[in-house]
Image (tube, rainbow, N blue to C red):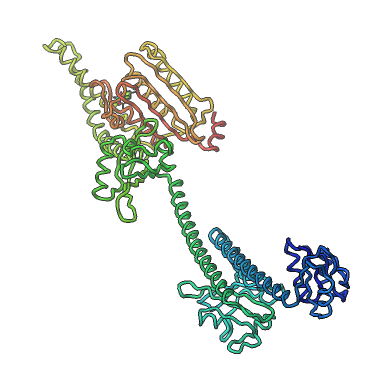
Amino acid sequence: MKVLLIGAGKGGSALLTILHEDKEIEIIGVVDNNSLAEGLKIARQYNIPTYTCYEKLITRKDLDVIIDVTRNPQVLTDIIRNKPANTEILGGLSAKLIWSLVEERKKKEEEIQKSLSEQKALYRIGIMISSAIEMNDVFQTIVKSGLEVTNTPAGSLALYDAEKNELELAAVHGFSPECSLKATRWKVRPGGLASRILSQKQPVVVPDITEESAMDTRVIFAEGIRSLVATPLTAEDRIVGILYVDDYKPRTFTKRDISILELLATQATIAIKKAKTRKQLELKNLELKRTTDYLQNILDNSADMIITTDIENNVVEFNKGAQEILGHTQSESVGKPLCGFFADPVHCNQLLEKIRQEGKISNQETQFVTKENKIIDISITLSQLKDTSGNMIGTVGISRDITEFKRTQAQLVQAGKLAGIGQLAAGIAHEINNPLSGVLGYAKRLMKKAEDEETKKAPGFESFQREMKLIVDSALRCKKIIEGLLKFSRTSETVSIAVNINEVIDESLVLFGNQLSSQNIELNKILSPNIPTIRANHTQIQQVFTDIIINAIQAMSNGGKLTIATRPVNSSAVEIEFTDTGEGISKENLPKIFEPFFTTREPGKGTGLGLYMIYRILQEHHGHIDVKSETGKGATFVITLPVADVDTQRGNASDQ
Ligand SMILES: Nc1ncnc2c1ncn2[C@@H]1O[C@H](COP(=O)(O)OP(=O)(O)OP(=O)(O)O)[C@@H](O)[C@H]1O
Ligand SMILES: [Mg+2]
């Protein structure tokens, strides 16, 4: 449709913009006798030809419509007279009618557009709030959306601290940087805007601050603000903040504006609530993590074994202490039955039954088996593990390896016992020594007396002489024992010199050269060349080695192997190990072998003082002796002696 527009004033311009948008319409020209008319400018922008006189144009054959908005009767007369027959005329009034109809439609479209953009903004905020991590982002979005949907230039969101009666700025938008809204926290002023909102709990609308008399608006007025809406953020009937939208000119806010701002305020409240919950959760998690770390730390750093189980008594936690002592890794142990770690599973079940009934057992002694099948003594404290409702969900056991402690304890008992027996024996020895000398002396005298020819002839002399000899021999044997006992009760006589252990071993072995080979005993010497010198009584140490070797030879009556090894330990001690492959020592005899007079030898063959004296000598030298043996499996004696200190070591050089 080809259209000619005559008149390019206000009405013409408006029509031009509307018609121009219509694809069906082709505007062939715009006419106005005022070449500066507004409509002509617009037409040029649209590339539409412009004219200052219409006479020729109105005669054009292809014209469908001539629109005349000049309201000049002369113009209308000219058009009617000269236009082609088929061309229609649209006069001023009808043009105005069309214009207002189009305008109306445009307004409607704009409204639809606006509500669409409001919905979009709300939707965007909804999404944002449900996924936002940063509260500040949420607040910024809410303020920006508030401005967008109400078409205001500036706004802010402040959080209300009821305890201090203060507001704190959480987000701000559209204010110039020099604006005093930079203040981030302020007291609620009595009679001010915030005060009003807090009391009425409803949005406060101020279309024109200059006409506001009920409130003290001096502060906001000073900011240049002329109109505003302040909407409270309400959670469970308490105000937690205020959303402001502000304009620098007076304006009316529609009901729709306010209800949208209320909606935004609700969203902001939800966001605040969510943030608070999240913060609390984060704190709880942190607390939980701290507690877990703390407990894990205890578990990891405890030298004791901490083992927890589930209700079926299968391992759940197996700490580092347990891993180190028992040799099993955590993954090897988790899920395995607890009783599998006990040397005696029956005892384990008894303990578990006991805690089921009594709730706890403390410092119970039992035995565990290590990965290497070694049995260790442990002290265990076992308790029930309970859930929050008090139901038993498993057990927690804290155990300590007391093998070493028990050994030391046994040694102490042994040492005490031996010391007591030693004193007693020494006392008795002393008392017996004199009468025994008498018995021996008189027996010898009697024997001598009987040596004259007369007595020899007497009947039964031979048996008399034999019996007298038995008396003398027995008395001599008693004397030997007593001398031995007395020797070790006089400890102060010990003389210490620098001693090389390897040399003493060789000296001792010289005595047995033949005996070893004739008894089919193989000798294996592993003497460390780096053995440090010790300070000792040479003769006594030699006696120690000799007695141990004799015992070993006696234990290997059918041959075997004797291994003698020396080695330094931590540069502070030396170890001397004697291992034989003889008959070994039974479990019952093992604790008794260091006691004086304990012997398994035939009567008259052993005094049972050998190991007792070894024990005493080593004690005087601040050393000790350990034994490992089983019936039929040979015996190992390990002697530990302290190394002389550095000065002594140097002194040794000059001793030698
Ligand atoms: N190497 C060994 N193998 C097996 N049993 C041993 C060994 N050494 C010591 N014994 C046991 O320990 C006991 C005590 O030894 P100890 O040396 O104190 O006395 P004894 O050898 O019996 O007598 P004595 O040393 O006076 O001749 C021995 O009778 C023996 O049963
Ligand atoms: Mg002996």
Between residues 497 and 185, which one lies in front from this camera angle?
A: 185
Q: Residue at x 82, y 73 (%)?
A: 79
* Residue 530 appears in view: yes
On the rendered structure, is 40 left or right of 539? right
Between residues 134 and 122, which one lies in front from this camera angle?
A: 122
Q: Position of residue 386 (x, y in %)?
A: 32, 52
Q: Residue at x 34, y 40 (%)?
A: 314
Considering the image in quadrants, where does the N terminus appear?
bottom right
Q: Position of residue 327 (x, y in %)?
A: 42, 35
Q: Residue at x 67, y 77 (%)?
A: 247
Up-down: is 485 above or below 191?
Answer: above
Q: Position of residue 52 (x, y in %)?
A: 88, 72
In the displayed orientation, state which residue is furthest to the front.
Answer: 85
Up-down: is 245 above or below 493?
Answer: below
In the displayed orientation, state which residue is furthest to the bottom.
Answer: 213
Between residues 615 and 254, which one lies in front from this camera angle?
A: 254
Up-down: is 163 above or below 591?
Answer: below
Q: How many marks?
A: 0
Considering the image in quadrants, where does the C terminus appear?
top right
Between residues 442 and 175, which one lies in front from this camera angle?
A: 175
Q: Position of residue 490 (x, y in %)?
A: 35, 36
* Residue 621 appears in view: no
Query: Which of the 4 image quarters holds residue 220?
Result: bottom right
Give the image quadrant in which the ligand numbered 2 is located.
top left
On the rendered structure, is 78 left or right of 521? right
